[in-house]
Amino acid sequence: VQDGTPRADRGGAPEVALPAGDSSGRCRILLDLTTAYSWRGRKAVGIIRTEREIARRLLGDATLEVLPFLFHGGQLRALELSFARAMLAEPDAPVLEPVAPPAVEPPPSRRARLIRPFAVAAKWATRHALQAVPSAARPEVALSLIHAREAVRRLIYPPVPPPAAPAPLVVALALPDLSLVLHPRRTDVIWTCGLAWDDLDWAPIALLKAQHGFRVVCLCYDLIPILFPQWVPSHGDLYLSHFLSMVDIADEVPCISACTARDLHDFAARYGRPAPRTSVVRLGANLPESPDPTGLPPALIERFRKGRFALAVGTFEVRKNYGLLLDVWERLARDPGFDLDLVLVGMRGWLIDELLARFEASPLHETRIFWLSDAGDALLSWLFEGCHVALYPSLYEGWGLPVVEALLHRRPVIASNRGAVPEAGLGLATIIDPDDFPGWCEAVAACARAPRVSVPAAPIPSWDETTADVRALLLRAGPARQIA
Amino acid sequence: MSRLLQISTYPTLAPRHGGQRRAHQIGRALERAGHEVRRVAAYDFAPYHGQPSEPAIDLGRLPPPTHPAAWLFEGARALAQDPMELAAFSRLCEPADAIVLEEVWLWPVVRTLPGVRSGALPVIYSGHNIEAPVFARSMRGFGHPRAEEYGAEVAAMEAELAGIAAGASAVTDADARALRRLGARRVVVAPNGVEARDRSHLAGAIPEALAREHRFLLFVASAHPPNASGVPDLFMALLTVLRPLERLVVAGGVCHLLREWLQGGPTHLARGRLILMGELSDFCLDGLFANAAAIVLPLRDGGGSNLKTAEALYSRLPMVATSTAMRGFEDYVGDPGVVVTDEPSAFAAAVRDVLDTPPPSRMPGPRLDRLLWDSTLCPLVAMVDEVLDERAREADGRHRLPPGPAEPPGERA
């Protein structure tokens, strides 16, 4: 019997060991870290953060048997636990090549290079001169000459200082040992929640699963590439292939919102598939670092410290609908009494050249509207703490993590009514249709006029709770789904 | 905190072969005991290319050995006879309270250090083996013309070192007796051990050379020549009992020696039965241990004790070994799943039996935990402490003023 009980409020089947397909019969979690590996040294976006946060906790759970792996060359390659832990512990650290401290062999100095020809000549002359010495006395003379040579050397060369103690070994983040091919067992369950459309080759997994009957649990964030292909860079049929494989092969597809679960069921129905088992797993919203504005220019720190800014967080892309916010600000800024700044936080996304040109051409750009494209967790947390209101006018979302993060900081939120955004609002956000431009103007203006307020505390899941839900799903008893 | 200088003939920071592992573990055990351990080495850099190293001298710059198997002996001797290299080595040796010398080979070098010459710096001999007889046999095996002379020279080195050392450690009781016979004063037995490694999660994680359907026997050994001493008879017998989906997987430097044998040997029998993996990472070895059906230790020769035997015992896998391989671990003969036999056909039959009817696993617990390095090296650490205490007392005695006449009673204010 596996240790641990599923949280009562989430329900779920009891955790029991699966029928023995190996000597132990114990369920082993095969942890896909392919995306985390390929994103080493880069700041985490939502999906990467999710993979890292859950993986770190599963690996740290001593009651679980967990084997991390990378998908590589059409095979599952086992990853050393120590490597995986080091990779997840400092995911943003620069990637380091392994460096072996050199054995002590100092390169010849410039002086040594200059003297060398003379030394060679002296050696040659001495050897010939030695031939003239009677053989009985030759060893003694040779030994005296060696001592003389050492004395001369000591005069010419400064003593070599003893080498420093070797530096501690650097964790070789760049080169994992991928020498072990992983053959899953019947009692295994694969957990994957990364950029599966990029990193996962479903065909060999299907074959292995058909042969050996392990389970696959794949987290689904959204079906936006299928529902709104115009908002994502064209990848041909990449996403269609991925989602078809997912509904065909995965035993369970937890979704990050009820909206995404509905979308997935609709997708399966549209393509004539039985829907896989789904459930809703809420993502954690706790930022891992304390608020800290370090990295922001001092003038901006001073400006934002007053708290007179609205914050919008999310990748700078069309779907986030930042164009609406630009329109709202250009309208409201005509009123001299409107003093709220707009701070956008998010990395540069795709298909935004036109939108970006509009922002840069606006007279409000960098006077009332600021875009921070490289903010870390600490700065983001500081901005959430300080903002007057958080805005989220997105045209569609599988969840709405920035909404939840704002609520976690007890900040008021004005958000769109599309996709899962209202769900993420937890009944506390002001929900407005993103097509309702006057409605947004009115809501932002009203908020700017009102004094700073805090919204009531809401039950927001932490990453620990998210991981507990995932753990319960992974250990849930049940046979693997047969692949048709 | 005492300063110890550990001297070895290989890099010890990221150990691969048995000698490296033992020296590495000794250094760590002494550090855990509160000593400051500085490491120095002299070895041929080429075979250890890319491995992290303590400060070291490259023996590869010296005249090449007359035979690859003689490089430790000849390289160290050449170093001792080259004043410039000797001076360079001496400069690497930082001041210390004692020297821990790993194996005998560098003794001709270490004996020239001023502190050792004067007797002020105690030397602790960390023996891995009684080298002379094994070395002579090995040289004879290779047809080296100076095998006897070299053997005698190594024997003399061992005797001199044993006589001078303030303490000595051996890996088996037999080696300890031999050291005492050579005149060693304070001898402890610190057997080879094993590092606890969690491998249970690696079921089904195997190198690409193996298929999921394969059952395999595992033999892990370094390129130390005695490790191939089971060639040809034990290996031939082993290969003949394997069925179509069974393999003998060999890992470690011993593969180089087996390749030599295979060049003119049973290539047809080996094809489809024998997989030579070569030197592997610890992680890859973990995968092999986690999935092997059994361990085999087909050794005919060798001194000291086999580090891989401790590993095999601790793995709890069934194992078939020769009595030579069990040297130092005789206490475990007869434990569940430990079969010891020397005769080739009996060895092969035992392997077949283990594959057909897997014996029960050895139970984890204190008996197996005694194989961990922390436990096996305790006597060595205690002996080092004792030597240092003794030296400290001697120094204290030298520096203390002789007692003066007792004060007459009543004269104290």
Image (spheres, coloured by chain):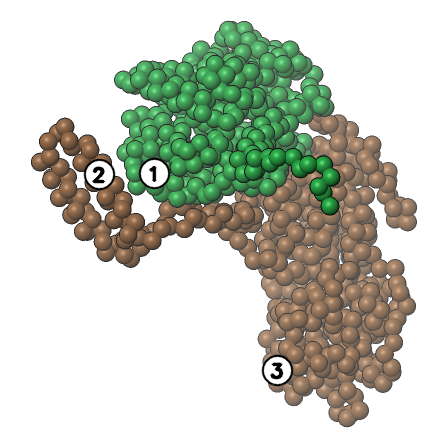
Chain colours: A brown, B green
Vertical side of B402 occupied by B357: above or below: above
Q: Chain of mark 3?
A: A
Task: Tell me the residue that label 1 is attached to.
Answer: B86
Residue A185 rendering spot, x and y as whole percentages: 68, 32
Write down the quadrant of residue B161 in the picture. top left
Q: Looking at the image, which is closer to me, A176 or A324?
A: A176
Residue B69 rendering spot, x and y as whole percentages: 36, 25
Q: Secondary structure at mark 2?
A: helix
Vertical side of A365 occupied by B79: above or below: above
Mark 1, other Cα within 10 Å: few <14 / some 14–19 / many ≥20: some
Tag shown at residue A360: 3
Residue at image x 23%, y 53%?
A115
Contact (CB < 8 A) between labels 1 and 2? no
Mark 2, other Cα within 10 Å: few <14 / some 14–19 / many ≥20: few
Residue at image x 66%, y 52%?
A89
At label 2, which amino acid type do we have?
Ser
Residue at image x 64%, y 27%?
B375
Tag shown at residue A199: none
Vertical side of B297 occupied by A252: above or below: below
Q: Secondary structure at mark 3?
A: helix
Tag shown at residue A144: 2
Q: CA distance from mark 2 to mark 3?
A: 82 Å
The count of marks equals 3
Q: Chain of mark 2?
A: A
Residue A256 rendering spot, x and y as whole percentages: 78, 55
